[in-house]
Amino acid sequence: METGESTGRPVAPGVFEVRRDGPVLIGATCPSCGVTSFPVESSCPRCLSETMEPCDLPRSGVLWSWTTQGFPPKSPPFRGAASADSFEPYLVGYIDLGRVIVEARLVGVEPAAVRIGQAVELRLVPFPMSADDGSVDDVLIHAFAPVGAP
Amino acid sequence: MSGVSIIGVGLHPFGRHVASGLEQGAIAARAAMHDAGISWSDVDYAFGGSDDAGRADTMVARLGLTGVPFINVANGCATGGSSLISAVNALEAGAADVAVVVGFDKHPKGAFDPSAEEYGLPEWYAATGLMLTTQFFGLKIQRYMHEHGISASTLAKVAAKAYRNGTLNPNAWRRNPYTEEQVLASTTLADPLTKLMFCSPAEGGAALVLCRSAIARRFTSRAVQLRSAALHSRPFGSFEVFSPWLSVERGDSPSVNAARSAFERAGVGPDDVHVAQLQDTESGAEVMHLAECGFCEHGEQERMIQDGETELTGRLPVNTDGGCLANGEPIGASGLRQVVEVVTQLRGAAGDRQVPGDPRVGFTHVYGAPGVSACTVLTR
């Protein structure tokens, strides 16, 4: 999976936005207790407030935990276009952004080099997604990579 | 303390079978009634469920059309525990003298494939490959090992123990032993977890016959007292399966709350327990659940497991029937299988895997998506 910036359709509206200075994840903050969610939630699971305000999330953070996806997920619900034979294992992590810990793919690093606590930053990467009719669309998904990784 | 006793237990062997899931449930129910010395016409209330194998109440066509009220329960991995709690409530409310609880399942091969919609999550979360139970378990134990100094050797020892216990259980699915080295050398599915550290979706059935304790002696002299049964959903700050985000404010898991409630209601504590069955979807789960259920401090498991304290002959034998690792995971049946095993141990009837020293207090814990936990305390 490439780690460089790409153009393409976001995997879904409202997950992230591409700004002039780069991509940003869209979360929501509770005006009553300050809890931040990702993606946007409509109510606060902590203080039960029924309003949450959309907000930009920090673009960098530290790796909080990680694992590997060593086998192809069942499809559906998985829509990755690779066949079982061409499936490439991938990394998944939780990234502590200071106000919320978000789950995302981890790119630009090999499993042996991953360390909890390492600094990572937001990237958008292409994801070949298959539709019900079999067509494949290269959408963009959010991921995190070690700071400075190519 | 609940006023409910268990007077009969039954299983259909776990594994892969020709019989439908429903038939496996009916066989388990008949076995439990036979064990209790009652017939289906003696049953005042029934509760049961499966996740993947159909409606439990259709079992009346096999067991007998007596008109008994039969309520289907669907609560994910806690389906068995939820059926049990429903029966306890009915018995304590005076709605029944004798109740049957039954759980069964029959899952296709391979990892579970839940839809995002079913869990109230956006479709992209599953479509892009983030919604897998295996990932959650890898992510949770990876962080836990980092925070609490648990080694890969300890994860492997948990699995090796499960397979060893499974060889002693005629109802288990996996009955071949694997060494710690073989467990570590098997394919990594979700780092740090290998294939042999994970249970597999499977098939099987489990059933209980319960009655009000006041009348238990009518049926048997070896009733086991269900001291308590408690179920909790997740509190804010817990680390749960299928979470696109976690709070930076970390909190307890639902297992902490369910175990605490179960012990409080039972009037006994973790130190009093002689045999425990803890949800072991994978090796790390058993390690973490030991602390979450109050049996040790976080991190203390490393020494406990390396010293063999959770083996059949140890201070606190855990998953004496091989757990989910050796039995597989038929979701509707697993929580009740744990109760069947504890009752069997408390009766002293567990054969080659019998815990020595006349165990009198047992504990069960089941956990599953999207963050629900059910615990029981049993005594004789």
Image: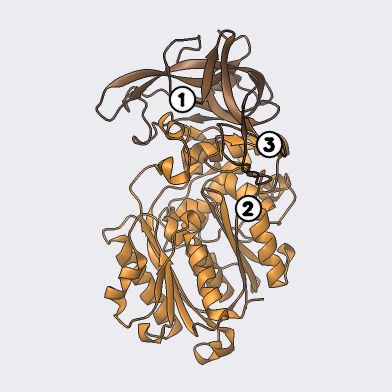
Locate the N terminus of chain B and report the quarter of the image it occupies: bottom right
- Chain where mark 3 sits: A
Image quadrant where residue B173 sits: bottom left
Q: Which amino acid type corresponds to the residue marked 2 in the rendered image? A: Pro
Chain (brown): A
Question: Can you give x and y, in whole percent of width and height, for residue B125 in the image?
Answer: 46, 33
User: Residue sitting at 57 percent across and 80 percent down?
Assistant: B92
Q: Circle 3 sits in a helix, a strand or a loop, which is it?
A: loop
Marks 2/3: CA–CA distance: 20 Å
User: Residue sitting at 55 percent across and 34 percent down?
Assistant: B244
Q: Circle 1 sits in a helix, a strand or a loop, which is it?
A: loop
The one nearer the camera, B204 or B85, is B85
- Chain where mark 1 sits: A
Same chain under badges 3 and 1? The reply is yes
Q: Which amino acid type corresponds to the residue marked 1 in the rendered image? A: Pro
Image quadrant where residue A102 sits: top right
- Chain where mark 2 sits: B
- Say which colour chain B has: orange
In the drawing, what numbered circle is on residue B254? 2
Residue for badge 3? A35
Using a 10 Å C-alpha cutoff, classify the residue at mark 3 as few (fewer than 14 neighbours), some (14 to 19) or many (20 or more): some
Using a 10 Å C-alpha cutoff, classify the residue at mark 2 as few (fewer than 14 neighbours), some (14 to 19) or many (20 or more): many
Question: Can you give x and y, in whole percent of width and height, for residue B253 in the image?
Answer: 65, 49
In the drawing, what numbered circle is on residue B23? none
Same chain under badges 1 and 2? The reply is no
Question: Can you give x and y, in whole percent of width and height, for residue B314 in the image?
Answer: 66, 59
Q: Which amino acid type corresponds to the residue marked 3 in the rendered image? A: Val
